[in-house]
Image (cartoon, coloured by chain):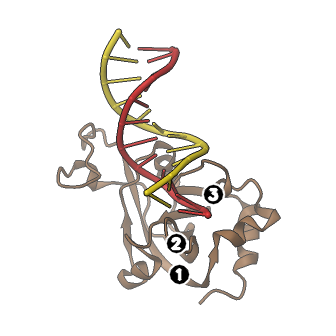
Chain colours: A brown, B red, C yellow
Amino acid sequence: MRRWLMKSEPDEFSFADLCAVGLELWTGVRNYQARNYLRIQQPGDLVYFYHSSCAEPGIAGLAEIGAAAIVDPTQFDPASAYFDPKATPAAPRWYASSIRPLRRVVPTLRLTELRAQPALAGFALLSRGTRLSVIEVNDLYAQALDQLLEGRLL
DNA sequence: GCCAACGTTGGC
DNA sequence: GCCAACGTTGGC
């Protein structure tokens, strides 16, 4: 099982929204490195659900991958903001995964707390200039995150 | 293949 | 709203 951190702007789609729908197809990733991660995700992989671009950035929930490496349908839809005219069904460019909620994190594990944790030094989320919306979390960083999450999982 | 211009991300 | 950092685009 791999672990991932996936970012969402809560104004667009929050962890509470994920809980409300139960299962969501995670589309619209248009960065090649993030796409490559989506392609190697597996059902059951753990997801740290991160709220970005908001008043309190941080990890708001745990989720898991449902299905992975799904061809992202929005790339073929001219009405979609994620339409990619260079993508064809025969040669798709972009992929999606479905995710489902597992646990709420209360209170949110804030970015400031993550930065204060020495064990997370070097974690891509905290590195200058890293803006990937899908980040792989290695065992060491996962251990540090899980430690910070203790007692906050609902 | 280089590189300037532009757009986007995302914390603050 | 600001701005740093980065990816992408497109002219040459």
Q: Residues within 10 Å of mark 2 (few under 14, many from 20)?
A: many
Q: Give the labeled residue for mark 2.
A: A64
Circles 2 and 1, Cβ within 8 Å, touching? The answer is: yes
2 and 1 marks on the same chain: yes
Image quarter of residue A4? bottom right
First in residue order: circle 2 vs circle 3: 2
Which chain letter goes with mark 1?
A
Residue A23, horizontal then vertical, whole percent: 38, 76
2 and 3 marks on the same chain: yes
Q: Give the labeled residue for mark 1.
A: A102
Vertical placement of residue A109 versus A116, above or below: below
Which chain letter goes with mark 3?
A
Residue type at the position of mark 1: Leu
Q: Give the labeled residue for mark 3.
A: A125
Circles 1 and 3, Cβ within 8 Å, touching? The answer is: no
Vertical placement of residue A126 versus A144, above or below: above
| Residue A45 seen in render | yes
